[in-house]
Image (tube, rainbow, N blue to C red):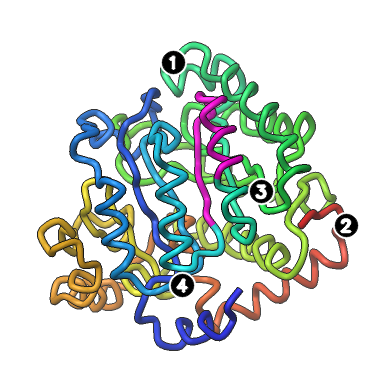
Amino acid sequence: MNLGRIASRMIRKDQPVQVILFVTARCNLRCKMCFYWEPIATADVHQELTLDELRTISSTMAPFPWLLIGGGEPVIRKDLADVVSVFVEQNEIEHVTIPSNGWYTDATLELVETICTRHPDLYLNLDLSLLGLEDVHDGIARCEGAFEHWRRTYAALAPLRARFKNFGVGAIFPLSADNQHQWRESVDFLLDEHAFDSIVIGRTRGEPEDPATAVFEPNVYSEATAYLENAVRQGRVLGFRGLVGAVIQAKDVVMHGIVDRIARGGDFELPCYASRLSVVISERGVVRPCEILGEDLGSLRDNELDFQRVWLGETAERMRFDIIDKRCKCTHECNLTTNILFNPRILPSVAGEMVKNTVTRPFRGRG
């Protein structure tokens, strides 16, 4: 990790450290709580940024450490390993996260093997989204057999960690009205029947097709995340070895509290660095400050695929001031991660949680 570059970004906040790249809107599932349901419904492979277009866009971007792939179902994109390679070679990314619904077992295995073999210094984290157990999972996904595909893919991926020290398997449990009654059983299923490097409980966010799916009992999130935090301290989640792993685990505890207070209508707590340290690029080349705000910063295709032209443009500059002036706040975990880790005022809280975890957590981490 280039600590000098990270420190410079923390001070200047002038280029992204986190890029969320939607590589496709195509998806084989139609999850009830999905905020991206409209682009998925109108997905068109012919409108997606091509590999050559992405290579040009990447060449106009400054180096950054973390690439988060979005979709749709990212594994559907057959050249995804090549997309990742572009950003490794041109932007020196150090960590890539790919979420998946786990349907395409063989394609997922090939993707992991290709990326980890090509780029041994890159850390790849692949997160499998669990929506609930069996019929609940299939019902939310609106696809029979989705749960069994998920199980098959996990079973195939887990052994790869012995071959590739730069690979981790995570789980995401997106909490919604449709699975709130089953959160404890679902989390225990992840903890007791699997060995995940990380487990994340997220809140349904944005505007799903059915708004009711985003409304659930007020104490469910706090109870579920407290239960998970205790499991982490007990060593029931593998975790990642070293300083980075310790920071991530501590950050999650701080983040859970912020998310819960915001969701309950709490006051503004910390500035948002969307469009300053984090940015979203859609599969059609539209640049957005984040996944929540509706306003675009500009189209890369309308700006000769030049990221800096959009990033430094008038719209982007106005949006940065708007986010600050409006004291923008939301429960989006990706943005909150950046907001916490790059805010010196919050870091003491993270350090405090690191101390607690060090004292209480038995060592089980892996590199």
Which region shows up in magenta? 96-114
Indicate which disc, 3 or 2, sits on the residue closer to the N terminus: 3
Residue at 56% from the left image edge and 25% from the top image edge? 105
Residue 342 vs residue 331, the one in the foreground? 342
Q: What is the crowding at mark 1: few (fewer than 14 residues within 10 Å), some, or many (at least 20)?
A: some
Percent of width and height locating residue 277 = 39, 72
Gap in angstroms between the C-alphas marked 3 and 2: 19 Å
Residue behind mark 4:
269
Residue 146 vs residue 217, the one in the foreground? 146
Residue pushed farthest top?
Answer: 144
- Is 316 magenta? The answer is no
Contact (CB < 8 A) between labels 4 and 1? no
- Is 99 magenta? The answer is yes
Residue 227 makes an appearance in the image: no
- Label of residue 143 in the image: 1
Percent of width and height locating residue 91 = 43, 67
Indicate which disc, 1 or 2, sits on the residue closer to the N terminus: 1
- Label of residue 363 in the image: 2
> In the image, what residue type sits under mark 3?
Phe
Gap in angstroms between the C-alphas marked 1 and 2: 39 Å
Q: Secondary structure at mark 1?
A: loop
Disc 4 versus disc 3: nearer the observer: 3
Residue 76 vs residue 346, the one in the foreground? 76
Gap in angstroms between the C-alphas marked 4 and 1: 39 Å
Indicate which disc, 3 or 1, sits on the residue closer to the N terminus: 1
